Image: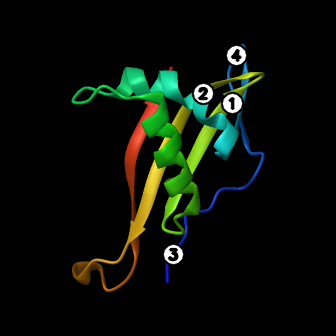
Amino acid sequence: MPCGISLIPGSGVANSALIYQIRPARENDASLLFPIARDFATSFEPRPDALVSSLRDILDNEAAWLGVAEATDHLVGYVLGFDHCPFYANGCVSRVEELGET
C-alpha cells in the first residue's frame, strides 16, 4: 500500500512580486510542463508526445505524485516524487525524482 505524498491543496508561497499556487498536476498541464522538463533534461532530448504518455502513466500511478507551481496563468516549476518500500526502512519512504523550475 503506497504511503502517499500529500500536500494541502491551494497552499501558496508568497514572493515579493508573485503568488505561487502549489497543486496536483493535471493531464492538460502537459504543454505547460514540456518547456520546464525540456530545459531540465541533460541526458535525453524530451519529446512532447513522450511527456504526454509519461504524464498519463504518472497520474495513474498511486505511488507517484506530481505537483506544479503555478503563477497566475503559467507554470513556474514542478516536483515529481515516488513512494517505495525498501527493506532497510521497515516501511514505505518517498523520494523526489525531479525538481524543475523556470
Dot 3 and dot 2 residues touching (CB under 8 Å): no
Looking at numbered disc 4 in the image, what kind of residue is underneath it?
A: Ser
**Residue 8 vertical position relative to residue 92 in the rendered view, above or below:** above
**Pair 1/4: label in front:** 1
Q: Is residue 39 visible?
A: yes
Looking at numbered disc 3 in the image, what kind of residue is underneath it?
A: Cys
Q: Position of residue 92 (x, y in %)?
A: 40, 77
Q: Is residue 101 visible?
A: no
Q: Where on the picture, by quarter, is residue 28?
A: top right
Q: Which residue is mark 2?
A: 31
Q: Mark 2 or 1 closer to N-term?
A: 2
Q: Name the residue located 43 percent from the left edge and 60 percent from the top edge.
A: 82
Q: What kind of element bears circle 4?
A: loop
Looking at numbered disc 1 in the image, what kind of residue is underneath it?
A: Glu
Q: Mark 3 or 2 closer to N-term?
A: 3
Q: Position of residue 19 (x, y in %)?
A: 74, 26
For the image, the number of numbered tags is 4
Q: Which residue is mark 3?
A: 3
Residue sitting nearer the eye, 57 or 21: 57
Q: Which residue is mark 1?
A: 70
Q: Which residue is mark 4?
A: 16
**Residue 45 vertical position relative to residue 98 in the rendered view, above or below:** above
